[in-house]
Amino acid sequence: MTNSQGPLAGKKILVTGVANDQSIAWGCAAAFKALGAELAITYLNDKAKTYVEPLAQSLGASLLLPLDVTQPGALEAVFDAVNERWGVLHAAVHSIAYAPKADLQGRLVDCSAAGFGMAMDVSCHSFIRMAQLAEPLMKKDGGTLLTMSFHGAHKVVENYNVMGPVKAALEASVRYLAHELGPSGIRVHAVSPGPIRTRAASGLAEFDALLDDATARAPAHQLASIEDVGYATAMLCTDHARLLTGSTLYVDGGYHIMN
């Protein structure tokens, strides 16, 4: 249900990276809608559309668009569609990450140059490109750019491997983008959920062990849900957070303080 009086009423928000109803991006989209936002949602390819289209329809999304950031012009096409439909954008969520399986599950020291470059391009540089395309649509009213990180950006997490350096670069990019875009009223954040059983996370070796460790060690002794992440992310898009920028917000029951 949309809250026409909610803190995001009237806001136009783009959510990328929805794969299914277990996606962190889906948790964000649902929270945004519940707080009054109007949505544009992307899906990776035709196979993913089968799962994403019913979800987008359930939220009354104004736009449902394909987005494979490895394809030239795909990200630009999304922003062209957003501009044509709305002419403005108040927030955008980047929930996109990828590394080739061999590089993700192998040691960092053995990571190929091609695999490292692919992981960095999809998981980090696409957020920088998104910021560049969002800036003209946010210059009038300001806005919020958000991306998804993980504690492995700061501490060694077993089996996180190449994604650790990649997420570290992503969080550094958040800080620099916040500095550069702040004068335009654009806020930039990374959201760092604890381990969540998503399709993307299933590619990590021994992921069940990581879930068990996080549950046992987190002060809250429970894992965050996609709903928890969604509402925390939505909070950063409200006017109540207007002077927050450049941060990494942990939504992990305190797990990050224990490592």
Image (tube, rainbow, N blue to C red):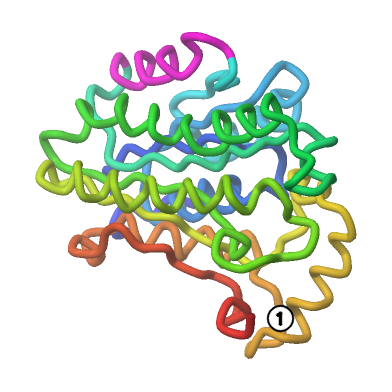
Question: Does 5 appear in magenta?
Answer: no
Please tell me whether residue 47 is drawn above or below residue 167 in the rendered image: above
Left or right: 42 in relation to 3: right
Rendered image quadrant of residue 54: top right
Viewer-proximal residue among 106 and 210:
106
Q: What residue sits 65% from the left and 24% below the top?
A: 44
Residue 237 x %, y %: 32, 54
Left or right: 142 in relation to 61: left
Residue 209 x %, y %: 87, 69
Under tag 1, what secondary structure?
loop
Residues rendered magenta in the picture: 71-84
User: What secondary structure characterizes most of the magenta part?
Assistant: helix
Q: Amino acid at mark 1?
A: Gln
Q: Around disc 1, counting alpha carbons within 10 Å, would you say few (fewer than 14), some (14 to 19), or many (20 or more)?
A: some
Please tell me whether residue 20 is drawn above or below residue 215 in the rendered image: above
Viewer-proximal residue among 173 and 212:
173
Q: What residue sits 54% from the left and 70% below the top?
A: 251
Q: Determine which residue is flagged by label 1.
A: 222
Question: In the rendered view of the protein, which quadrant contains the C terminus?
Answer: bottom right
Rendered image quadrant of residue 96: top right
In the picture as drawn, the residue positioned furthest to the top comes out as 72
Q: What residue sits 48% from the left and 40% below the top?
A: 94
Please tell me whether residue 49 is drawn above or below residue 74 in the rendered image: below
Q: What residue sits 20% from the left and 26% below the top?
A: 136
Question: Does 83 appear in magenta?
Answer: yes
Residue 240 x %, y %: 23, 66
